[in-house]
Amino acid sequence: MPDGIGHGCNTPCIEVVDDRTGAILVLDAGSGIVGLSPLLTGEPRPVSVLLTHYHWDHLQGLPFFATLYQPGWETTIFSPVLTSHERGWLDTMFKSPFFPVPYEHLPNRPQLQMVRAGELNIGGFEVTALPLNHPGGALAYRVRGAAAVVLDAHFTPKELPQHRGWGHSDWRQCAEFAAANNVGGLWLFHHKPGRSDQELVKIRTDARRIFDATETASEGERLQL
């Protein structure tokens, strides 16, 4: 979408890197996970992929994740136990007609570990998992030591009443949450498909009237915490 190219049009994926240890944590595996490939260089090391839930936009990039095909890299997928969880979901993603490389033929088959709400250690990161009100269930994650918050701002306040039960927030709710909890910075995330850059700039401007340290997340953006 040309008028949204500034922020990007891929689906959710966030990478967290601990510069002290080199540990890598990937939150969700939307189509944005493909953009991590140029960053996965140097000596192979473990990579943890932590999923929030099983909706397609949060999984669709997984078969294209570079570490599944590069020798030496070890990938562990941390998969939430939810009412919508089906044990065979990972194998199904790689089956024909959905993907040409079956799971059992992957050069580096990922390990799978199930996680529940509570205190977790994910690849060296101390994480708190909290249940969300989302169709089929979902988990939110707090990474200890992080100074910023990334929140789902899929809708505008005007759009939200027509989408009750969809499991998404609006930008005003996110800004009010950030202001009430004195966070270091707010990144509005998971933009509604079709949202233009111009619309997102206006959303950011309006949100800053509530919480000044607000940004609209863009593909490839880096944040030092």
Image: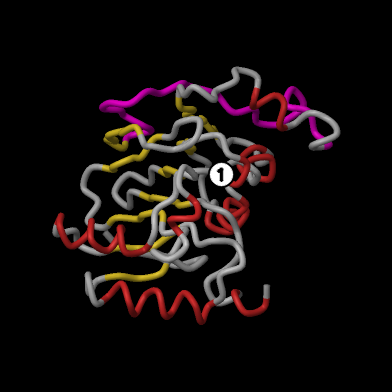
Identify the residue at image location x=46%, y=52%.
14
Nearer to me, 44 or 3? 3
Magenta stretch: residue 158 in it? Answer: no
| Rendered location of residue 30, percent (x, y) | 58, 48
Nearer to me, 171 or 15? 171
Count how many numbered circles sit on residues in the image: 1
**Image quarter in which the N terminus is found:** bottom right
| Rendered location of residue 67, percent (x, y) | 61, 41
- Disc 1: CA contacts within 10 A as few (<14), some (14-19) or many (>=20): many
Residue bounds of the magenta highlight = 100-124
Q: Is residue 218 above or below residue 138?
A: below
Identify the residue at image location x=59%, y=28%.
110
Nearer to me, 2 or 94? 2
Identify the residue at image location x=21%, y=47%.
145
The residue pinned by badge 1 equals 58
Q: In the displayed structure, does residue 55 sit left or right of residue 173?
A: right
Q: Is residue 151 above or below residue 188?
A: above
| Rendered location of residue 163, percent (x, y) | 50, 51
**Image quarter in which the C terminus is found:** bottom left
Q: In the displayed structure, does residue 221 sit left or right of residue 58?
A: left
